[in-house]
Image: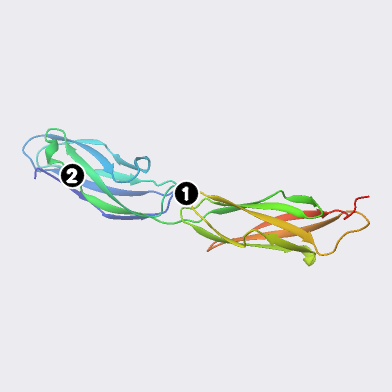
Amino acid sequence: MSTTATLESTEVRLDPGSEAVVPIQIRNNGTVVEGYELSVIGVPGEWAAIEPPIVSLYPGTTTTATITFRPPRSARTVAGQQRFGVSVLPTEHPELAVVPEGVVEVLPFLETTAELVPRTSQGRRGRHQIAVDNRGNVPVNVLIDPISDGDQLQFKLDQVGLAVQPGEARFVRLQANARKSLWRGEPVTHTFVVQVSPQDSIPVELPGSYVQTLVVPK
């Protein structure tokens, strides 16, 4: 074979949002000057690049190019291993192309956000929604636990626990009821906190309030 190409490392591990650089050595073992077109295949083109993309070598000489992997920190960047190759294509003899191969492993990351909508409700009972958004690249299990100040409220949830896929937003209905009915006087404001606990992550606390009104309006 007139061309050889060797990756300095055939295994790459990195976090989304970071980068890793892998050198590749290319040698012209032929007897004529040869140009080469270089490209990375097997992984998304937007987060793998090679520099320079074109090289020229005299017979018996070697050069080094660099592959840079930059998977974005996004829910669309799937965690796990992917095989990749580097196509080294001779411009004069494309039939003699070589493709050294390796494996790039994208590591998982967790990023879960939550929001209480609305923050304040009013009426004979409070009605809210909890929005849970998984911005990480692996599924996440979430537990939801509302806690009232002074234990003045009791709660009803659609779901106590839910599984949220990468890039997905899930909604849970929350109903707040006062333990004691209000027959006279002024409306009473009850405060509470909804604790959203993603698996293996720091819990998120969502403060809220429910304004309890009279059973029979004045």
Marker disc for residue 75: 1
Q: Amino acid at mark 2?
A: Ile
SS of the residue at dot 1? loop
Instruction: Please provide percent x and percent y for residue 118.
Output: 71, 48
For the residue marked with disc 1, what is the amino acid? Ala
In this orientation, which residue lies closer to the viewer: 208 or 159?
159
Query: Relative to 200, is 157 on the left or the right?
Result: right
Measuring from the top left, give residue 111's x and y in whole percent. 53, 54
In percent of the image, x 44 and y 47: which residue is there? 76
Residue 23 position (above or below residue 93): below
**Snapshot quadrant of residue 183:** bottom right
The tag earlier along the polypeptide, 2 or 1, is 2
Point 76% across, 50% down: residue? 120
Is residue 202 at all visible to an observer of this figure?
no
Judging from the image, the colouring scheme is: rainbow
Which residue is disc 2 drawn over?
A: 26
